[in-house]
Amino acid sequence: MRVTDLWERMSQALGQSYAKSWASDFHVSLLDGRTVEQALAEGEDAQVIWRAVHATLDLHPKFK
């Protein structure tokens, strides 16, 4: 998954403006307590991040 795909999915799930805020402020336990922004900066794979966000937000399984 590309990082642009991650941002697109996050925008669909949270809304475009809130997705960026959430990504910089919310610490995701499945990312070892890092924010999405921190995980990206540390080189975490976008697919791993998306799976963590998907689980954290308890999104419907068909929402991909």
Image (cartoon, rainbow, N blue to C red):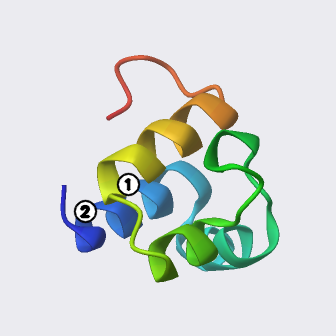
Rendering quarter of residue 8? bottom left
Residue at image point 50% right, 20% down: 60
Disc sitting over residue 5 in the figure: 2
- Left or right, 20 with respect to 63, comes to right
- SS state under label 1: helix
Name the residue beneath numbered marker 1: 9
Q: Is residue 34 above or below residue 18?
A: above
Q: Residues within 10 Å of mark 2 (few under 14, many from 20)?
A: few
Q: Nearer the viewer, residue 42 or 62?
A: 42
Q: Amino acid at mark 2?
A: Asp
Residue at image point 52% right, 49% down: 13
Q: Position of residue 18 (x, y in %)?
A: 68, 71
Question: Looking at the image, do the residues carrying marks 1 and 2 touch, with CB atoms under 8 Å apart?
Answer: yes
Q: Is residue 40 above or below residue 54?
A: below
Q: Nearer the viewer, residue 43 or 46?
A: 43
Q: Pick out the residue farthest to the left.
A: 1
- The answer for how far apart the CA atoms under marks 1 and 2 are is 6 Å
